[in-house]
Image (spheres, grey):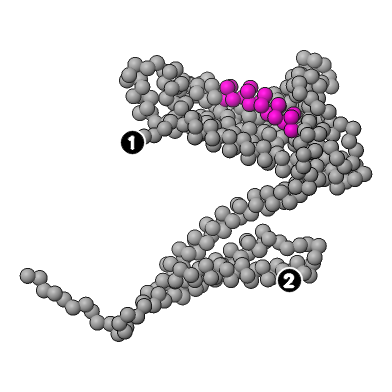
Amino acid sequence: MSQLTAPPKTDAPAGAMPNSYATGRLPRFVPWTILGGSFIIMIAVFALFASADPEGGFNAPGTVFLSVVLYGIVIYFVARMIEGPRRAKDRLVTTLVTLAFVIALLPLVSLLSTVVLNGTARLDVTFFTNSMRNVVGEGGGALHAITGTLLMTGAAAIISIPIGLLTSIYLVEYGRGRLAQAITFFVDVMTGIPSIVAGLFAYTLFVIIFGPGIRLGIAGAIALAVLMIPVVVRSSEEMLRLVPNELREAAFALGVPKWLVVLKVVLPTSIAGLTTGIMLSISRVIGETAPLLVAAGYTNNMNYDLLEGRMQSLPVFVYSSYVSQGTEAQAYLDRAWTGALTLILIVMALNLLARFIARAFSPKLSR
């Protein structure tokens, strides 16, 4: 029979709660308390600076950044005194990683907050139903620019997505030897070309065909397609390479031809990644200004025909409203900010649509 041993005796009274400081671990509330105190201190400091200089305003990004820095310094020394150097270093590295995330997030939050605050001034029905034809000063809208952006970006997508997808399928499934290497090299070169070069290429192409001074919406679409194709190729190629070879081999073992394996196995398996890459390429070009200003031109009139006359786009509309302010400068600035906010909303809507398509058409996994 095993002998029963009595529990070790301790000096602590019965029913007493263990002291977390004695165990060498900080209580859970201490890091949050230090973080809150850091924010309170920095808010007070920046509030004093803002009261001394009212025109400068309150610096929210600086407050967040320096609060995290102060938290990292304080938590390191507190943890070193209570938990030891090893745990203190672990907390310090965790704080540095969090600080890097905050640094990456602050410009985005600052940009979005600035655009939203300034862009709501003209977020009305008139802005989305009127153009700028015969408008000087207040009033007018960006319907002609929104229409031009959707038409040119849609045409560019129709041109570039099939070319990019077929090129990536060739490189992954069929490409071997010098031809595949040459295609990969030129795709990499196209990825880094400046956007103005794409605009000049499209403009020169149509000048050769139609003569000097030509500006067409289809020329802007071709310029955007030149910028989209390498992004579609590179992103689609990476997604297709992630498809396991076992799926291809299982289909080949059943006697399925290769083109049908690509169509029925490879593409449906990678549809989520392909959709994300396509949306990334559209987001890449939808905000381009220089190539559209060169190839499609500028106009205040409505134009629904890509093959006839100049066509306005939202980026060019924002640029022209900002740099060519009339007698009522604030009206032009309000239209520029609202145009920028509209462009962000369009990109957000396209990304939500891409997520819906990826979820709807991706293979359904079952047990």
User: Which residue is drawn at the image coordinates 36% and 77% (left, top)?
Assistant: 18
Q: Mark 2 or mark 1: which is in front?
A: 1
Residue 157 located left or right of residue 149 = left
User: To which quarter of the image does residue 55 belong?
Assistant: bottom right
Which residue lies most toward the left here?
1
Which residue position holds label 1?
Answer: 367
Which residue position holds label 2?
Answer: 48
| Percent x, y of residue 364 | 42, 32
Of 13 and 171, the residue lying toward us: 13
**In the picture, which quadrant includes the C terminus?**
top left
Residue 114 vs 4, above or below: the answer is: above
Q: Which mark is residue 306?
A: none
Of 188 and 32, the residue lying toward us: 32
Q: Secondary structure at mark 1?
A: loop
Label 2, label 1: how far apart the Cα atoms are: 61 Å
| Percent x, y of residue 170 | 50, 21
